[in-house]
Image (spheres, coloured by chain):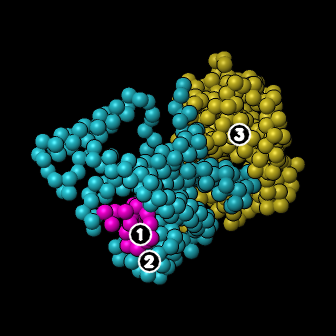
């Protein structure tokens, strides 16, 4: 059974149809990307999943249950890191656990062993403003992961970083993901990132968004930290072509 | 949004030197002018004379400073409590905010000269009218600062909290309240400078004791030196309150000072 499944989901905000027909699914341990042009409604999908919006049409199920009966199936990492500037890094990372009612001490103890893995040991007591962009992003990711939800929702997590840091972070992330196999749904408009990290990629049309392509990425991992394969290059070119021309698939 | 609220100017002895120099030189010039011109102390007393009178009348001044301090602190505490409680109510109930906000704005347009005698008329010469007037004057800047501060909260942080399953109350406690603190302290600094002045004005209109009464009586008996002595004390009180808010801000907003490293 799919961890997450969306069937013919649509939503209209005001008089604008934002999502027209979205059908997708994610299996346990799978890395799935949603690739689409800016403003296509990628983030709207996340707003549906996190309960900030309600869909008008179609069904969303999480572990076979309708979304409203399994309300906290997702851990969300927003576009910017959204770290609270007044909380130390450790307290930012434990935020999701505290919101769920876990005592601060217990939450801290649970997070402590993961800090090193995320390159944050020694920085627990720092405030976010004292950290580099890459470290802040790792802290935001750790805050997402420790919630131990069935699906991780990552909204362009590396989009705000400079090119060099982004490449470092993607390589680091791939290694972490390979070790842990978090079930992940990534939203991005970066074709290379989608090809490098995903098992499968859904391509969205511009607004109102429909799924116009579903593509498997068969390349062996790890894919980063070495020259991209010819297959990967071909796939990137194919995806760019779809995004730029939307050939054939437009009704 | 934090850049909208200026950081507290940093300490450091060197930064205080120009301020001290300008204040000291003002008094020196004043002193020299009074001595050279031979102007009557009934018109313009020299700083040295004001100081002498403060020493001579120290017991009398002290007895009249205490009621002023008491009224200021009580009024300010009342105002702070109401502003905080009300800001929370307004944040949770936007409808009430829209209904009540115009009233608060109007409350700030009332001239103190007209309101103070009425409040004294209604509540007598004791502590109550002073507390009410201080509260009336100081409450609005703090309330507006808090309400604006809540609104300044990063939308992404709130969306994140809601995705974690946070209730409205949790979002308020974890995100909106801390986001409002820099704004609150900006409002607090403004309020605190009004507080002492408002008390003295209320006393001036009607009281049994207090710095306002000292000023009133000294003026009526042609003693500008005593008027100025009371002015010095009232300035000192305001400065002390100001320093206390700065200290409190340093404790609460320590994270802002820590920022920007690396």
Regarding mark 1 in the picture, which secondary structure is present there?
Answer: helix
Does the magenta run of residues contain B206?
yes
Specify whether disc 2 shares its chain with disc 1.
yes
Q: CA distance from mark 3 to mark 1?
A: 47 Å
Residue tagged 1: B202
Q: CA distance from mark 2 to mark 1?
A: 8 Å
Residue A172 vertical placement versus B50 (above, below): above
Q: Colour of chain A?
A: yellow
Where's residue B69, x and y in %?
49, 58
Q: Chain of mark 3?
A: A
Left or right: residue B197 compared with residue B157: left
Residue in the foreground of this view, choosing between A234 and A210? A210
Find the residue positioned furthest to the front.
B56
Residue A202: quarter of image: top right
Label 2, residues with CA under 10 Å away: few <14, some 14-19, many ≥20: many
Q: Colour of chain B?
A: cyan
Q: Residue at x 74, y 62 (%)?
A: A58
Q: Please identify, in this view, whether the residue under mark 3 or under mark 1 is nearer the observer.
A: 1
Q: Is residue B53 visible?
A: yes
Where's residue B257, x and y in %?
53, 36
Answer whether labels 2 and 1 touch (C-beta < 8 Å): yes
Does the magenta run of residues contain A86?
no
**Which portion, as a residue range, is magenta?**
B196-218
Answer whether labels 3 and 1 touch (C-beta < 8 Å): no
Q: Residue at x 32, y 46 (%)?
A: B52
Label 1, residues with CA under 10 Å away: few <14, some 14-19, many ≥20: many
Q: CA distance from mark 2 to mark 3?
A: 51 Å
Residue tagged 2: B120
Residue tagged 3: A91
Residue in the foreground of this view, choosing between B172 and B83? B83
Residue B59: quarter of image: bottom left
Q: Chain of mark 2?
A: B
């Amino acid at each position: 059974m799919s961890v997450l499944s969306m069937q013919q989901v649509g939503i209209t905000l005001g008089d604008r149809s934002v999502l027209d027909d979205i059908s997708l699914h994610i299996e346990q341990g799978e890395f799935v990307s949603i690739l689409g042009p800016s403003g296509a409604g990628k983030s709207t999908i996340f707003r549906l999943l996190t309960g900030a919006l309600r869909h008008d049409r179609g069904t969303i199920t999480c572990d076979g249950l309708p979304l409203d009966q399994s309300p906290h199936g997702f851990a969300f990492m927003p576009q910017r890191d959204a770290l609270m500037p007044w909380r130390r890094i450790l307290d930012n990372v434990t935020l999701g656990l505290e919101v769920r009612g876990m005592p601060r001490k217990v939450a801290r103890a649970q997070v402590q062993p993961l800090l090193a893995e995320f390159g944050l040991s020694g920085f627990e007591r720092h405030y976010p403003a004292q950290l580099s962009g890459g470290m802040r992003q790792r802290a935001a990711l750790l805050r997402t992961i420790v919630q131990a939800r069935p699906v991780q929702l990552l909204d362009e997590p590396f989009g705000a970083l400079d090119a060099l840091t982004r490449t470092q972070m993607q390589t680091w992330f791939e290694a972490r993901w390979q070790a842990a196999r978090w079930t992940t749904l990534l939203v991005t408009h970066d074709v290379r990132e989608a090809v490098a990290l995903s098992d499968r990629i859904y391509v969205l049309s511009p607004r109102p968004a429909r799924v116009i392509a579903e593509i498997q990425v068969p390349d062996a991992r790890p894919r980063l930290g070495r020259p991209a394969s010819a297959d990967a290059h071909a796939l990137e070119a194919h995806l760019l072509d779809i995004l730029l021309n939307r050939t054939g698939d437009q009704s | 949004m934090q850049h909208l609220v200026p950081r507290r100017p940093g300490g450091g002895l060197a930064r205080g030197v120009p301020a001290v120099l300008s204040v000291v030189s003002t008094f020196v010039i004043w002193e020299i002018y009074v001595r050279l011109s031979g102007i009557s102390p009934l018109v313009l007393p020299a700083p040295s004379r004001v100081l002498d009178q403060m020493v001579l009348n120290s017991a009398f001044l002290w007895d009249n400073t205490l009621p002023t301090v008491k009224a200021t602190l009580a009024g300010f505490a009342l105002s702070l409590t109401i502003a905080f409680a009300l800001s929370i109510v307004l944040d949770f109930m936007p409808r009430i905010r829209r209904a009540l906000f115009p009233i608060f704005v109007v409350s700030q347009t009332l001239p103190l000269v007209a309101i103070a005698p009425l409040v004294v008329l209604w509540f007598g010469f004791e502590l109550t009218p002073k507390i009410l007037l201080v509260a009336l004057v100081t409450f609005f800047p703090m309330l507006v600062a808090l309400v604006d501060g809540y609104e300044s909260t990063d939308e992404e942080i709130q969306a994140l909290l809601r995705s974690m399953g946070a209730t409205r109350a949790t979002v308020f406690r974890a995100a909106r309240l801390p986001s409002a603190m820099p704004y609150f302290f900006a409002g607090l600094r403004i309020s605190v400078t009004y507080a002492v002045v408002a008390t003295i004005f209320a006393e001036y209109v009607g009281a049994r004791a207090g710095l306002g009464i000292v000023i009133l009586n000294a003026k009526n008996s042609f003693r500008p030196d005593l008027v100025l002595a009371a002015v010095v004390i009232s300035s000192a009180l305001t400065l002390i309150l100001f320093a206390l808010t700065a200290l409190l801000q340093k404790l609460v907003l320590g994270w802002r000072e820590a920022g920007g490293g690396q």
